[in-house]
Image (cartoon, helix red, strand yellow):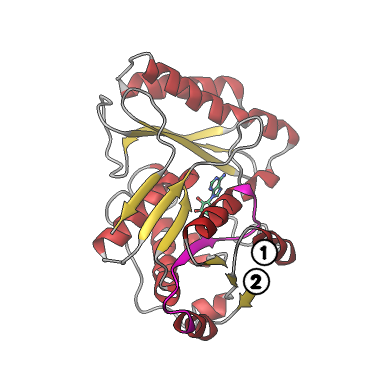
């Protein structure tokens, strides 16, 4: 596995492999099975896999955990190497943002809901860094986890609206044995919180059950999901929402594909989880958008 730290070297590498089909997996590191599932799929689909690790300051709010975000480069190198990554791009902040940026991305739609509402500016930061990375790496296919479903919806809009010639693949959420979605931030849960956190997923399964039984009223389902979370954890609910996907429009009656999404704030970690469903309650495991 080749390690590249500068934009210039990354562009030279890409130029030297101009005929290859490139799969790209952007990450913030502290790799776990959710990340490696994207890498393995990218290796299956493409000639070369490029992954990046960059904790992007632009996407963290002033009171968020940029400084505390877990980092372990040595461990990440080993994991990436074992999961089909050919090139690991590890730029530092000075490489990515050498000056104050005169031009940045702003998203106007799909953002006043879910995490976009609770984390103002977060998705603008995500889109700015991804636009830079897509331009530097020029991948054919990009891989994202559906755990961050709003990110998938927003990157789909980026590819569509700004004509990036690439395919986005949204892959299933990888979970711990008890159902908790894997996340780099899970290390910040106390033992009690870790036990309770399984109720995020259990409450989503309860939402699926309601839909499968024919319930179409989004409010009844969100209330019931929220009640289950409240009864079983001391974390504070940030949101429980049902929206269309990937447009992220609110719906009172569920008659098209929908996402049930939850976010719960614990002492030192904010956890998110979701399920994507057909209107009859059948699970949608993968999402693909081809430009
Ligand atoms: P992050 O390092 O948290 O920015 O995540 C990098 C990529 O890995 C994003 O596309 C995430 O959606 C994806 N990812 C994170 N956790 C999981 C998970 N549990 N299952 C699947 N994909 C994930």
Can residue 151 be seen? no
Q: Tag 1's secondary structure?
A: helix
Q: Is residue 31 a member of the stretch shown in magenta?
A: yes
Please name whichever residue, 30 or 231, is drawn nearer the observer in this view of the structure. 30
Find out whether the residues at labels 1 and 2 contact each other: C-beta distance under 8 Å.
Answer: yes
x%, y% of residue 115? Answer: 43, 46
Residue bearing the label numbered 2 = 1
> Relative to residue 284, is residue 256 drawn left or right?
left
Q: Position of residue 278 (x, y in %)?
A: 33, 29
The image's mark for residue 20 is none
**Total number of numbered discs in the rendering:** 2
* CA distance separating discs 1 and 2: 6 Å
Residue 180 counted in the magenta span = no
Q: Residue at 57%, 64% (x, y): give it.
A: 55
Q: Residue at x 59, y 32 (%)?
A: 235
**Residue 128 position (above or below residue 248):** below
Observer able to see residue 191: yes
Relative to 128, does residue 245 appear above or below in the rendering?
above
Quadrant for the C terminus in the image: bottom left
Crowding at label 2, few (<14), some or many (≥20) Cα neighbours within 10 Å? some
Q: Earlier in the sequence, mark 1 or mark 2?
A: 2
Q: In the image, which residues are magenta?
A: 16-33
Secondary element under disc 2, as helix, strand or loop, is: loop
Where residue 270 sits: x, y (%)?
57, 43
Residue at image x 55%, y 25%?
202
Percent position of residue 17, x then y: 47, 79
- Closer to the camera in the image, 49 or 158: 49
Per the image, the residue denoted by label 1 is 81
In the depicted view, which residue is nearer to us: 193 or 131? 131
């Amino acid at each position: 596995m080749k390690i590249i730290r500068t934009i210039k070297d990354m562009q030279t590498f890409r130029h030297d492999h101009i005929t290859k089909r490139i799969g790209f997996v952007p990450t913030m590191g502290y790799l776990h099975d959710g990340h490696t599932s994207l890498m393995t799929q990218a290796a299956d689909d493409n000639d070369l896999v490029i992954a990046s690790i960059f904790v992007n300051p632009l996407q963290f709010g002033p009171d968020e955990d940029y400084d505390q975000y877990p980092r372990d480069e040595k461990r990440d190198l080993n994991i990436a190497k074992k999961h089909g990554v050919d090139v690991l791009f590890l730029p530092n902040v000075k490489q990515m943002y050498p000056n104050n940026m005169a031009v940045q991305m702003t998203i106007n739609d799909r953002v006043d809901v879910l995490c976009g509402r609770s984390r103002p500016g977060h998705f603008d930061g995500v889109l700015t860094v991804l636009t830079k990375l897509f331009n530097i790496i020029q991948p054919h296919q990009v891989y994202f986890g559906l755990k961050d479903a709003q990110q998938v919806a927003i990157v789909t809009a980026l590819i569509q609206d700004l004509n990036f010639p690439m395919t986005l693949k949204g892959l299933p959420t990888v979970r711990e044995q008890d159902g908790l979605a894997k996340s780099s931030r899970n290390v910040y849960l106390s033992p009690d919180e870790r036990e309770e956190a399984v109720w995020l997923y259990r409450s989503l399964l309860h939402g699926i059950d309601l839909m499968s039984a024919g319930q179409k009223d989004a409010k009844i389902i969100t209330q019931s999901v929220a009640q289950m979370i409240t009864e079983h954890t001391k974390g504070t609910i940030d949101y429980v929402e049902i929206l269309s996907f990937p447009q992220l429009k609110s719906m009172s009656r569920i008659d098209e594909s929908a996402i049930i999404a939850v976010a719960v704030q614990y002492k030192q970690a904010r956890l998110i989880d979701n399920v994507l469903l057909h209107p009859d309650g059948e699970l949608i495991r993968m999402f693909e958008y081809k430009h």
